[in-house]
Image (spheres, coloured by chain):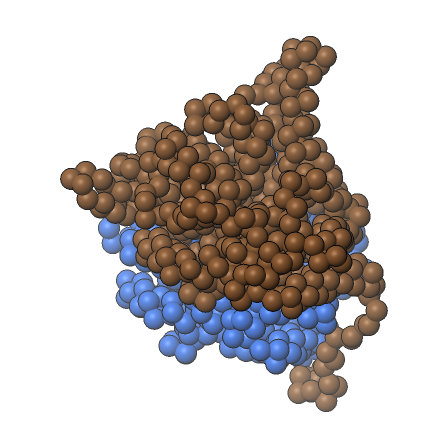
Chain colours: A blue, B brown
Amino acid sequence: MSIITVQIGQCGNQIGTQLFSTIYDDIFSKDTGIQASKNEDYMDAALNRFFSCEGSVPEARAVMVDMEQKVISQAVSAAKRTGRWRFASGQQYVRGSGSGNNWARGFAAHGPRASDAVLDMLRHESEKCDRADGFLFATSLAGGTGSGVGARLCARVREEHPRAVVVCHAVAPYAAGEVAVQSYNALLTLASLRRGGADAVVLSANDDLHAVCATTPRGGGGREPVSFDDLNAVACRQLAAALLPAEGAPPSLSDVVDALAPHADYRLLSMRHAPQPTAAALPFTEVAWTPLLRRLRRMHAATSARDEGFERESGRVRSVADLLTVRGDGADDADCDAIADHRGAVWAPPGERVRVRRCRRRYGGLRRSAVLVSNSQAVLGTVEGITEKAWRLFASRAYLHQYVACGLTEDDFVQSFADVEQVIHSYRHL
Amino acid sequence: MSQSILIQIGQCGNQIGCRFWDLALREHAANNKNGVFDEALGHFFRNVDTRNGKCQQIPVGDGIGMIHTLKARAVLVDMEEGVVNAALKGPLGDVFDHKQFITDVSGSGNNWAVGNRFYGRRYREAIVESVRREAEMCDALQCFFVLHSMGGGTGSGVGTAILGMLRDEFPDVYNRFVTAVFPSADDDVITSPYNSILALKQLTEVAECVLPIENQALQDICTRISKFSSQSKAGIHTSAAKIKEGSAVSDSHQGAGKCSVQKAFDSMNNIVANLLLNLTCSARFEGSLNVDLNEISMNLVPFPRLHYLVSSMAPLYSLTDVNIPQRRLDSMFGDAFSPAHQLIRADPKHGLYLACALMVRGKAQLSDVRRNIERIKSSLRFVHWNQEGWKTGLCAVPPTGQPYSLLTLANNTCIEKTFTDLVVRFNRLYKRKAHLHHYLTVDGMEVAEFDDSLQSVQSLIAEYKDLQTTRQSIFIPRLQVAASDYSMQYT
């Protein structure tokens, strides 16, 4: 079962590239904690899932899309430099000039032009798979290319492959402002993905990723500067842990979607992981399953990205569904009831709410680690914030002319607001 | 991958333009040790094989081909021959060829009407032809940079005529950045208020984005830099605090610099040239957060008419002595928001921000930018609907001679003061109808043009003032989900 990644825009391409290198490093990690024969099965399965191994060097199952050359060439050559894996040649779609943070330009101008070529590349990529499982889109929520072109491509892929699973990993911008029109772009993306496109949207907020980085000094001691690479590493660490093979429930992307996104109004997922040790403390990090999972549950309840130093939960976060992946020594016996403790939607059958995947192989140099992918009210903060700000801009009619110039109408905006308000409403009244 | 064309008009525009090409070549030379023609270089330059007497274009290809002869993607327009000829004869002569020049002999006589109505019409075809020729040699033309002054006749008149022409002839290239130099109060051109107001109306209507620069502000910056360097020579700061050679934004290095009489203007022009280099760095070089040129107007222009961006740069120079604790990165952010570093004479902290861009070059990390935004934002006033109106960019390549630098572009209501000053000076002349007849004798120029322009500028000022004073007056509640909605059935 193979996953094909579509990385769009600067953020998407950085995330995608980082994801493949995280996965590759994990596959060939020496610190497995399991028997060699078992490990080989795992390696085969994992490699086949993300890489095509027909040639001498594994090639990432990826299609790269950007409206600028620079980022893609950088990513391709960075992968080539490792000498261990690479991006397939001819699977890159590049145009001369960017979308300029304008969602409408990405969606209405660049997107349709790119669709056919990208769909061809996807077809080519899926022909290389024995069995394709689905598409993973990596985009940003706020940029023009990632969000606009991404939303358009999602919709086109949906049309062309109605049965394929489409999961979108979207990075939400810093709430304190990264792009002035970020809230418009994010709102339009969310609305468009809701209307048709992705089966599930995994949201990673830069603020959350930054919080994790800022409290885990890399290489020991002192406050170190945080770069985009660090943020991407955290996001990919979570994503890889959730997507790599494991036993138990959902073995494939479509099952992940089945388990986590059973309802059209509830498709927004968030990720949390524990433990988050410093690099220096890594060899000494030794947490038993029960405290680890209890901590993860508390993080979830407090909607904290960090694994320590957060406020005690004020109210509980209701979930539609959760997917817990535990990896490491004794994962088979880990008592995962602690996670199942929090409240779910009234209509969700209790037994179905939490699925657990277990893998006895260690992940990321940790003896025990856990990742929780959750379809819950945890996303409310991010989505609320975006909608609130976008509405303030819209009420003053600021920046509208830029979108109108690219063919979007005010009605489209109102419709998008209505769509996203519906999502917020649904989550709030779980 | 993308390309820009620089159109330099009039004496001021051409002088700044020449400094720009000089510094651009230096910047690329410093970052391109192998002498290859890569995509960064291809943004502003063409690679031409001039052997065999032909002008063979060499595409960037995979970015490892050698440089043959670099030609600037530029069009030089002047209604006199002096400056343009000097450029051609000077050390930069090789980067231009004759087809890129449009000149006349008699000048516009500091008269906007002559420049705009007479020469603008007369040379329209020639200019279109020349720009089109440059445009055809780009595979993804992204942006026109138009450089001119507001006070003179050619710059303001022909410059604004060219803007309209670009809009009509190249509708696909929606990025028209104008760098307009505003005259200082003691300007020696008596008609400069007329020219400026007439040109300002055109800029408001036609340009996509305008970076206003005030001569006086440039002079102030130069004075400060030279004061500091002379102080350090005199030993007041001890020998340790010396400006590192080639690091000040006004430095022209040696080499292609002109004779010493021109030095004062040269260093002022260098500041503007550096502004353009920093503005385009992200489009040329790699970085972890690229800023495409399209993104600037997208993020900074919430309403189409309010597209005047106040710019500032920091640091203005760096020190030679490594023993002095390097000025902290954070103080660079503080400096960039102080009045002394603005390229117009205004204090943005007293104005209202509609949006603000931070373009960082060099060894600065994402967390440095985030930290400083958190730190600075309490001292700035943002409009209520855009409290988070930041746009950030990170480019890995620093400017030559400095470890890092910051360019801020702000859509701030403080620009209104510059316009108001101009209107006052305009009215002083216009009340008495002084010098008006020079304009009215030009074919196609009427008094109504003056009134219209004045009105346009006044309404622009009013729009800025309105924003400055209005608080969050009307509150429109967000959309509500109707209770009878289908999703409610589940809860």
Quick check: A73 above or below A317?
above
Q: How many marks?
A: 0
At horizontal 38% and vertical 69% (from top left) the residue drawn is A113
Q: Looking at this view, is A406 or A222 the one in front?
A: A406
In this rendering, the answer to whether A62 lies above or below B251 is below
Image location of residue A264, percent across then percent down: 57, 78
Q: From this view, report whether residue A115 is shown above or below residue B17.
A: below
Decide if residue A247 is on the left or right side of residue B349. left
Is A356 or B467 nearer to us in this picture?
A: B467
Q: Nearer the viewer, residue B204 or A69?
A: B204
Q: Nearer the viewer, residue B15 or A153?
A: B15
In the rendering, at what x and y percent does residue B29 appear?
Answer: 40, 31
Q: Is residue B221 above or below residue B63?
A: above
Image-based side of A154 in relation to B385, left or right: left
* Residue sticking out furthest to the bottom: B484
Image quarter of the C terminus of chain A: bottom right
- Asked if residue B105 shows in the view, the reply is yes
Residue drawn at x 58%, y 29% as measured from the top left: B264
Quarter of the image with the N terminus of chain A in it: bottom left
Residue found 81% across the figure and 72% down from its top: B475
Residue A381 in sight: no
Identity of the residue furthest to the left in this view = B52
The residue at 40%/52% (across/down) is B2
- In percent of width and height, residue A52 lies at 31, 55
